[in-house]
Image: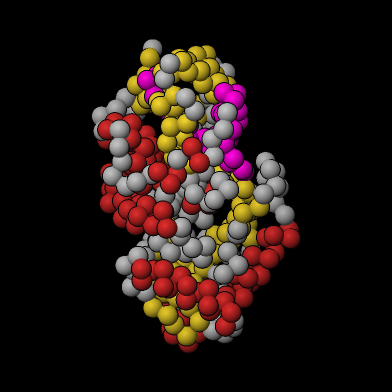
Amino acid sequence: MKEEIIIVGGGVIGCACAYFLSRQGASVLLLEAEHLAAGASGATVAVISVVGNSGTHAPLQPFILESYKLIKDIEPDFGVDAEIIEDGSLFLAFTENEYEEVKVAYELALEMGIKGNLLDGNDARKMEPLLGEEVLHAFYSPACYHINPLRLCHGYFAAAKRRGCKAEYGVQVKEIRTRSDKIEKIVTNKGEYSADWVIVAAGAWTPQILNRMDIKLPISPARGQVIVTEACEPLCKRVILMPNHTYFKQCKHGNFLLGSHTELVGFNNAITLEKTQIHAKAACRAFPILSKLKAIRFFAGFRPLSPDNLPILGPVGDCSRLIIASGHGRTGIKYSASTGKAISEFVCHGKTELPIDAFSPGRFYRK
């Protein structure tokens, strides 16, 4: 049977696309090789901050402002508690040099309409009494919340399913064949499918699908490692960010999640003591009581990283109905709603409310 739209990939981007397309009344089938949130979407700290500790590129600023609001607005539609906790963030500085980086984030926030505060260490400790004495300065941003990424993915899909979206699991896409600006067939390990549109939202695995069509996109698997502590009483209300890309949060159920920057090591998901120790030590410096908690779990995921740290959105190759939604790096959760909305607008109306030209696959595409 021919489908109107097939989405390849059941991570947060694929599920967000399914949700917004279903809201437009489209008939959607989602194909997933494993299960929802099996890749990077299930291996993340899941912080949604308008201005974080890695900056926000200018073309993305309207996207994060939209996504930040959208996720909160649509969460009641999910029928699933996504465990949104909104108490803002503290971006810490331990040295005067780091404070310069913190001030850059503060100035960017002002430009984007976010009224935060620059604090000295004592004022920061008034907000979070368990911060370490080595914290000299901080930028408090109210425009930050954290979320349960698994519940976010399942929430997007649950709301899409209520509107008729279907999903099939254990389906590995081998090839997408096109002819004369049309999708001819989607070849999988479970047979062939046909559709009017195909959206490839397969994260770090997107190039593997496109390579078979002789389409080369420079999306690299960037490993991100996460530490999970034992649960404890509430100790930290806010997301804590640091200039070395360490960041952490305390979840609704009491566990702390500590995250790190990304590593270009291919599809190697090994947990490395060297990297986890670096970020554990940084987190304990910021929040010394963390040193008393046991780490109960470590996990890693592959973030789909583009060379310019911008997502890759839009039609690719010679077929205008083959759409890419990938390349978000470590910000897929953050930009999921604005991405899903933009892709649904492009497919259903041929244009988007927010411009996506800067994210076009054409800036990389070669055949």
Q: Residue at x 58, y 64 (%)?
A: 245
Residue 339 sits above or below residue 282 on the image: above
Q: Residue at x 54, y 35 (%)?
A: 365
Residue 22: percent from left, percent from top: 30, 32
Residue 154 vs residue 62, the one in the foreground:
62
Question: Does residue 320 belong to the magenta stretch?
Answer: no
Image quarter of the N terminus: top left
Residue 296 sits above or below residue 306 on the image: below
- Does residue 113 appear left or right of residue 235 in this picture? left
Which picture quadrant has residue 353? Answer: top left
Q: Residue at x 46, y 15 (%)?
A: 179
Residue 25 vs residue 220, the one in the foreground:
220
Residue 5: percent from left, percent from top: 37, 25
Which picture quadrant has residue 237? Answer: bottom left
Residue 305: percent from left, percent from top: 57, 46
Image quarter of the C terminus: top right
Q: Is residue 312 visible?
A: yes
Q: Residue at x 54, y 60 (%)?
A: 257
Residue 152: percent from left, percent from top: 41, 46
Q: Is residue 230 visible?
A: no
Q: Which residues are magenta?
A: 193-221
